[in-house]
Each structure stands twice: as structure tokens, then as C-alpha cells.
Amino acid sequence: MRRGLVVAAVATMVSAAGVAVADPVSAQDVAAAKARQLAAGVQIVPKGSQSSGIDPMLAYLPNLSNVDIAGARRARAAEQAALRNRSGEAKPYTEREPVGVRGRNDTDATAEFLFGFGTGFGAASKFSLTGNLAPDPETKTLPPFAEDNGSIPLAPAVGEGRRIRTSGVIGDGPHGSSGDKKGDYDFYKVSGLSSVTIDVDTPASDLDSVVAVYNAAGEQIAVNDDQGPDNTDSLVTVPLPTPGDYYVLVSGFGENGTTFPQDPSDSGSGLGTGSEGAYTVTLSGQETYDKDVYSFFLRAGDVIGAAVTGGSTRLEVHDSTGREVFGSSQDFTSLYPASSPLPRGGNAVVDFLAPTTGKYTLHVRNGEGQYQVALEAYRPGTETKPRGTVQTIFLDFDGAQIDVGIFNAGATGVRTLSPFSTFLAGWGLGPADENVLIDRIIDVVKENVEKDLAQKSTNRNFAVKILNSRDHADPFGQGGVSRLIIGGSIAESGIPTVGIAQSIDPGNFGTEESALLLLDVLSGPTGRTSLNTYITPATDKIRFISQGVGNIAAHELGHFIGSWHVDQFNEVASLMDQGGNPTLMFGVGPDKIGGTADDVDVDFVEDVLNPNEGFSGHEDTLNRSGWGFSRGRG
């Protein structure tokens, strides 16, 4: 489970008229509230404040405080329409469970097997599935619950193991805009469930809803803001780690930390009102939805994608043990490169790379009525290149000119980025240190991206060539060469990040891309994402700086070859951790000092997909990355 967010109470006072009003909000309260909202994955700047902006899914950001996540999503979504529905001929398959019937194909054990699907000789790599999700006959509609239900102790119970639909209004309570203006929140208590799906709709208002799930201790364990780029309703499915009582919060998006109460046990602990309006909410246990499960065999290294339209809003891939390895209720395929053949568009999209040969399942769920699924399988992109072809990665330390518009991060035009040497002084180093530092950074990248993937992944056809600007001529522009520029600053690039990749590319189908690793934040005098923060007289400075820079370099290359962000706030240190918890990425050990004997070797590992990005399941970044670099066999 993710670490719980610390909460703090907000004091109140009583006016001469006897009406409770908020104490003046301190700067410390606001800063803490912003930090909590960002940690939950909800932006704190106005939505639409940027027509486009940096997408956190693509970037290793020092923080998210100035990022219009919603604006970035809308800009990406507008570009992807032309890339949809280009998959071509697919083998039709119709679900065998009769329309209106439930329970015949709802588990991995009873899954309908898709004979002939896959990438083997004579198999069909594209299936078009048609099925139907039966309505839930037990859906119960309840009238709105009375205010004040703005805290965990005041949350009304909605019953055990049922599918409940009710309605409410954000803003009508004693702390809404017509009350003391601290912020109105609606809580609901659910019990006896192994997982819960919360679906918030706003057909009669302009409410920009946000939902969250808390455990009985007041720890926030799941959040969803926008259901899609053009849909500010909320939808989240979350497994509940242990039996017991859980609390669902419906709120309105607010800037500067006002989306959530400071203390979920105190209905008057908000710092201000946000979006307000009417909503309906459906609270469902996993067992209340009809599910359709399809099974198939995959070969190790097979890359699959699936996109659903119609009556389903969620897809999940499970492995042979029944464990969820990729779950999604969103379409994120605008982040794929144009060259990716994986299916795009629809209510939900999943992708997955099989680490071993075996049986896997696709779960179609969350909805009612007829649906269509495009299910497709491919071999890794580099494997299909001419025999003997090897992907080249070029590490450019010399500075470069680049059209930053390729990153869709709000900046445009050709920018000139300063070389690596420009930033040595920020770490207290000089020209004499440059070569040894570059040597060590290259060693870290090769250990993470070449040695570990070759030795630890299941890909016995692994191959990659790593070149650098000091020792090799610049090959970028040739076929099969992607580059990572290690240099430049936020001011020079116009992109407020530490690192950013051009795409996320499951299977590595786009082999001529660019990524940036900017150095001004890393070499700055202060800040959580400055390497200097962790340097003391006990630090082996060259070792630590190369470790930090090399790990972020591997992170950006991990996006190139197909890995998404994993949870940066749990205890697992992974090269694919999202930004915001740099001590894990830098490998800082328990002594909180970098470059000492207790530092951690951070690698591509299996970890939980980042819940703030709308995914669920366990991502095997080792094998997604390992199979992304395959020697050509075409």
C-alpha cells in the first residue's frame, strides 16, 4: 500500500453573529495542502491555464506545481484522432455467453479461449471481439444523504457488497459557498468489498469532480480527477488491501490545495471552495459488475494492445497466476509514437509485454451493453528489423540544437542547449573532472540499460549499442538511432522538467527519437531534486553525481522502450519511479547522504504502476525494457 498522506487540522473561530468562520489561512497550511494535492496526482494550477503543457507521463519532473496536466492531456488527445482505426483486417470473434446472461465467463478459470490468436506461425495477430455486459439487477438507488457528510466520522453507510447509486451536491453543506466557504466534501462509507469502483457523473451541472478513497485511518489510497481529456467526471477502480470499512470522497476540483480536506475526520478543515455542483455517484463492488474474460497464449516478448468501445469502460490484463498486470479506464495512446501499430482510441486501452511464454487473460468490465474490443499482438519493433540490426542509443554531452516542439510540452522552435561541461561548476567540479564524470555516467547507463537487461531479462536476443558524443561521431539522423541529450537548462529548452522523452513506446517501434536530461535543477544549490542537497564531506562526489544523472538517463530511455511510471511513494526503488521522490531515484541510502557505502543500486524492477496516472497492476519494467532492445531477425 502507498504511504498515507499526513493530515493536519485547521482551527476555527466564531463570529459575533455566532457563525463559524475559518481562521486566517497561513502560508504553511497552503503549502502543505498544495503538497498533498500534488502527491495525490491532482494539479494545483487552474485547468486550461496552458493551451498545452508538459505531460507528467513523459517527464521526470522536479515537481508538478506549475503543470496544467488537464491542458496537456487535451492537447495530446486532439492530435491522436488521425492515428486511430488504422489496424486493418481483424478476425471477428463473438462472445459465446448469451446476451443478458452473467457468470459463464467471469473468471480466469472460465475464460473463453481465443484459438489462433498470437504471433506464431499461422496465427491471427488481430482479433475483433464483440460481447455484451449484462446489466446488474441489484443496482439500488438511494435518495441523497443529508448534510453534513463532509468527514469520515459523518460518512453515511451505503451497505455491504451492493451496487449503490445516489446523488448529491458539492456546495450545499455548511462549509460550501453558501456557508463558511471552507469547502464542501461528501463522504460515503463502503464495507465488505475486495475492490470498489466509483463512477461520478455530472449530467445536470458543471461540477469538475474528484474522487478519492480513504482507509479507516484516514490515509488516502486512491484518487481520480478527470476521466478523460475532455471529460471532467471521475472514475476509479481500486483494490482494497484488507477487509474492513473504507470511505469514498466526492469533491470538486480546487486550486492551491483546496480539492481535499486538510483532515478527513473534520468536515470543516478545508481551505476554501472549489468547483461546485450536482452529481450522481455509483459505488460498486467488483462482484456486482458483469465481466467477460478471454484467454490466449503469448510467446515471451509478445507485445499486445487492446482498446474497447461501446458498453465497457475498463480493461485489465492478468497473468497466468490471475494477477493484474495492467489495468486501465482511459485512453493514453496519444503518448505512443506515430510508428506504433498498437490499437488506439476508445473508452479504455491497455498494453502489455509478455515476459514468459504462457496463458494470459483479458478482462472486459465496468459497463452495460454491447462492446467491441480491438485485440492485437506484435513482436518487438526492433526484432522485426533486418537480421542483425541493433538499436543505437547516442548519449550527447556536447550540447545540441533541437526542435522542442516534438515533446508537446508547450515550448516550440529550435533551441540551443548548453553542453554538459557548463554545469560542472554547480557541483563544485572543474574541467579536470569532466572526463572521469562522463566515464562514470556512461558506466551507470550501460550497467542499467545494457548489462542488467541482458543478464536479468528473459530476452536471449537482447542487443543494444550505446555511443557517446565524446568518443564517437554523432550518428543521430541515421536509421535506428535515438538520442539522449545530457545538458541544457529549463530556460534554454522552455520545458520545466529534469527529463522528458518524446514518447512512451511499448515494444519500441519508434527507433529514431529524442529525449532530454536537463542539468540546471540537478546542479542547483538547493532543492529536493538537486544532487547538491545530498552531498556532504562524506560524499564520493563523482560516484554520486554519475549515479544520479545515469539513473535519470536510464529512466528516460525506459520510456523509449515501453515502460510507464511506477509508484514513487512506495518503498520500492525503481528506475521508472515518477518524479517527486528523488532520494529513491538517486539511490540515497538510509544515512540520507549520497555517495556513501549504504547507497542503493536502483534498477529496472517490477513495481506497482503509478496510481496517480490512472493505471493499476504490476509493471515488469525489467522485461518491458529488456525486450524493447531485440536484435533484428527480419
Image: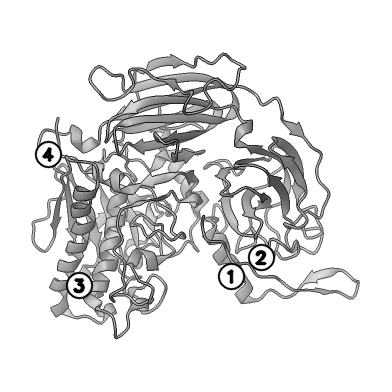
Instruction: Measure the C-alpha gap from mark 4 to mark 1.
Output: 51 Å
Query: Which label lies toward us, 3 or 1?
Result: 1
Which label sits on residue 32?
1
The percent coordinates of residue 311 (x first, y second) are 57, 26
For mark 2, what is the residue? 262
First in sequence, mark 4 or 3: give its number: 4
Quadrant in which residue 535 is drawn? bottom left
The percent coordinates of residue 585 (x first, y second) are 35, 63
Q: Closest to the observer: 315 or 184?
A: 315
The answer to whether the residues at label 4 and label 3 have Cβ atoms under 8 Å apart is: no
Q: Is residue 86 visible?
A: no
Instruction: Give the colour scheme of this rendering.
Output: one colour
- Please state if 624 lies on the left or on the right of 178 as rendered: left
Instruction: Give the residue type that dot 4 points to.
Output: Thr
For mark 3, give the secondary structure.
helix
- Please state if 209 lies on the left or on the right of 542 as rendered: right
Quadrant where the image shows the C terminus: top left
For mark 3, what is the residue? 421
- Please state if 615 lies on the left or on the right of 200 as rendered: left
The percent coordinates of residue 86 (x first, y second) are 36, 26
Which residue does the image show at 47% across and 28% down from the upper left? 108
For mark 4, what is the residue? 389
Answer few, some or many: residues within 10 Å of disc 3's Cα (few below 14, many 20 plus, some between 14 and 19): some
First in sequence, mark 3 or 1: give its number: 1
Instruction: Give the residue type that dot 1 points to.
Output: Ala
First in sequence, mark 2 or 3: give its number: 2
Query: Which label lies toward us, 4 or 3?
Result: 4
The percent coordinates of residue 199 (x first, y second) are 63, 39
Instruction: Measure the C-alpha gap from mark 2 to mark 1.
Output: 9 Å
For mark 4, give the secondary structure.
loop
Which residue does the image show at 8% across and 61% down from the upper left? 471
Instruction: Give the residue type that dot 3 points to.
Output: Ser
